[in-house]
Image (cartoon, rainbow, N blue to C red):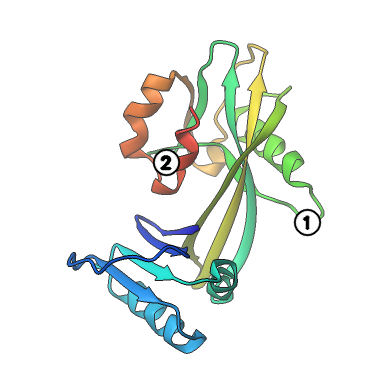
Amino acid sequence: MYKVYFEDRLIIIGSEKSTENKNGNIKLIRYKNKKSFYKALKEFKKDTNILLLYVQTQKPKKVFKRLIKKFKPIDAAGGLVFNNDGKVLMIKRNGVWDLPKGKIEKGEHRPDAAIREVEEECGISGLIIEGKVGRTYHTYTFRHQNIFKTTHWFLMKYEANGKLTPQTEEDITEVMWKTPGEVKEIIPNTHKSLVNILKEV
């Protein structure tokens, strides 16, 4: 199953069958061909009252790739970082709580990019990668281009006590260590695409 976020709205591409739903904010379609799929995608993008488009198909990966073809793809990497007290590293960007992440540079490996971005955005160093967390997908428009961003998330450990410094040139105003309880409280003020990643907390 693939979940792709369009700001607060969502497209799900999966193989499970869905029963008819009378909720007008949810549109359910069965994938037939590329033409009908792109028509449904165009309708979804235009009609912001549709909060969820569910595409049922026996080949989710194939349909997912066809969705990406309508956008300019960008790969990013970031970190779900814990310190020795079990707190989580969070940033506030443009007034919204977020996890540190950024674009992968040409020729750069994903884990290296994830560490670099966390270090740059939070002003710390000495991070240790302990594993992968998952991927998130979301779209946005930048300079009249439709962007499809895939973010690769890594579980990290920070064992030092360095001072946190927000990267203000990236519109980051705060960097803080949050307890799992505090993270749960701020979920309503974060991006919906991050919810599944933050559940790892």
Give, as a three-letter code, the residue at label 2. Val
Give, as a three-letter code, the residue at label 1. Lys
Between 3 and 32, the one nearer to me in the picture: 32
Estimate the x, y position of residue 2 in percent, counting from the top left: 50, 59
Between 13 and 155, the one nearer to me in the picture: 13
Q: Are marks 1 and 2 in contact (CB under 8 Å)?
A: no
Instruction: Please give the label number shown on residue 196.
Output: none
> Horizontal placement of 47 versus 30: left or right?
left
Estimate the x, y position of residue 176 in percent, counting from the top left: 48, 23
Local packing at callout 2 (Cα closer than 10 Å; few below 14, some 14-19, many 20+) is some
> Horizontal placement of 178 versus 148: left or right?
left
Estimate the x, y position of residue 95 in percent, counting from the top left: 37, 39
Estimate the x, y position of residue 85 in percent, counting from the top left: 54, 10
In front: label 1 or label 2: 2
Between 37 and 97, the one nearer to me in the picture: 37
Snapshot quadrant of residue 190? top left
Q: Is residue 33 above or below residue 124?
A: below
> Horizontal placement of 176 versus 109: left or right?
left
User: Upstream in the sequence, badge 1 or badge 2?
Assistant: 1
Q: Secondary structure at mark 1?
A: loop
Local packing at callout 1 (Cα closer than 10 Å; few below 14, some 14-19, many 20+) is few
Q: For the point 40% across and 76% down, which residue is it?
A: 30
- Separation (CA) of disc 1 from disc 2: 28 Å
Instruction: Please give the label number shown on residue 106.
Output: 1
Q: Pointer 2: what residue?
A: 195
Q: Is residue 200 above or below residue 34?
A: above
